[in-house]
Image (cartoon, rainbow, N blue to C red):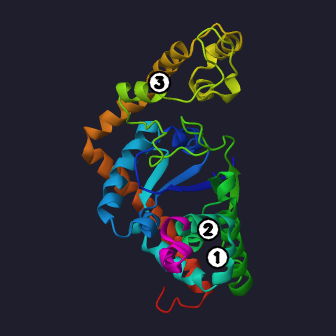
Amino acid sequence: MGEKKTILTGIRPTGNLHLGHYFGAVGNWVKSQDAYNEFIEIADVQALTDNFNNPDKVRKNVRELTLDLLACGIDPKKANIFIQSMIPEIAELTVYYSNLVTVARLERNPTIKTEIAQKKELFGNSGESVTYGFLGYPVSQAADITALGGTLVPVGDDQLPLLEQAREIVRKFNSIYGETLQEPEHLLSSIPRLKGLDGNEKMGKSLGNAIFLIDSDEVVTKKVMDAKTDTTKIHKDDPANPDVCMVYYYHKLVSGENLETICTECKEGKRGCMQCKRELAKNLIDFLKPIKERRKYYEENPQEVDTILKEGTKKARFKASETMAKVRKAIKIDYFEE
């Protein structure tokens, strides 16, 4: 057997994980940790591009995010969780890469264009809402991936432009300085972005339509009872269309064995919405139970969490230092390297 390929993935510490994170990303990371050499970056530096005036929030959420990842089943014996800011080699590589990318190219990146438009909508049309750090996010991400030798990067469709920009940077670096770095490949998520309970295409804390992994049983139940259903169903025994019902949408995630029955009863008017919601709430609570139990264990063992972060960061920095030795040699700034 050949050497395992390296996966580099990351998540910004801006809040607790919700079901969208789990089904869209973290659940897949749990499945892939056996087959790959996996590095999971807690991207605190990138979180500061939007939260530079609230560092306490970022610092607190580094811990919260680590607890959530471990609760989901990330095994520190198989995967390495590390903190981005503790790897100075990433910042150094970001500086070198910044010479290879024009401002015009960054502004053309579809992901960045969309986020800049959202910022201008919130803060007005002046360019003051877009910082140098925010505009350079794709450069920083390219450094994250290549510093750790990431050969595969799990992404959704919306992140493909960022990965393609990383590939462009690697190609340009290699064309100028010689074959030094490997172009990363995408590992496309098979699950699209999870919709919110209200039917919104995006699930998010600010939208109030998300179920978080730390939500209590009571909170989960309340949120499910408020979920959007087929608005054409007026009476309990009216037939309905499960394809436009967010309750059925979530049943498809956690109610596998009974899914066909739920669908048929809904279409035939044999299932009331309240009954369906109560069943979904129970199934979601059962699904979240082992996640909460693992989280409780790590909450009660904070020193173990510290050790996991320190060891993961140590391994990541060793890997990044190997990469940077090659990079410095390629660009002829290895003045005193032995």
Quickly name the residue at label 3: 225
Quadrant of the rendered structure where residue 87 is? bottom left
Residue 19 in percent (x, y) is at 51, 37
Residue 39 is left or right of residue 35, and the answer is: left
In 3D space, how far apart are the residues under numbered discs 1 and 3 (Cα atoms)?
43 Å
Q: Is residue 289 visible?
A: no
Q: Does 30 lie within the magenta span?
A: no
Q: Does 125 lie within the magenta span?
A: yes
Could you say which is closer to the camera, residue 197 or residue 191? 197
Q: Is residue 191 above or below residue 232?
A: below
Quickly name the residue at label 1: 106
Q: Amino acid at mark 2?
A: Ile
Q: Nearer the viewer, mark 2 or mark 3?
A: 3
Q: Secondary structure at mark 2?
A: helix
Q: Amino acid at mark 3?
A: Met
Say which residue appears at 62% left-offset and 85% top-offset: 330
Residue 116 is left or right of residue 268, and the answer is: left
Residue 193 in percent (x, y) is at 62, 44
Q: Is residue 63 above or below residue 215?
A: below
Q: Secondary structure at mark 1?
A: helix
Say which residue appears at 56% left-offset and 83% top-offset: 96
Quadrant of the rendered structure where residue 44 is? bottom left
Q: Secondary structure at mark 3?
A: helix
Residue 22 in percent (x, y) is at 52, 40
The circle drawn on residue 112 is 2
Identify the magenta region. 121-135
Marks 1 and 2, the one that precedes in the sequence: 1
Q: Residues within 10 Å of mark 1 (few under 14, many from 20)?
A: some
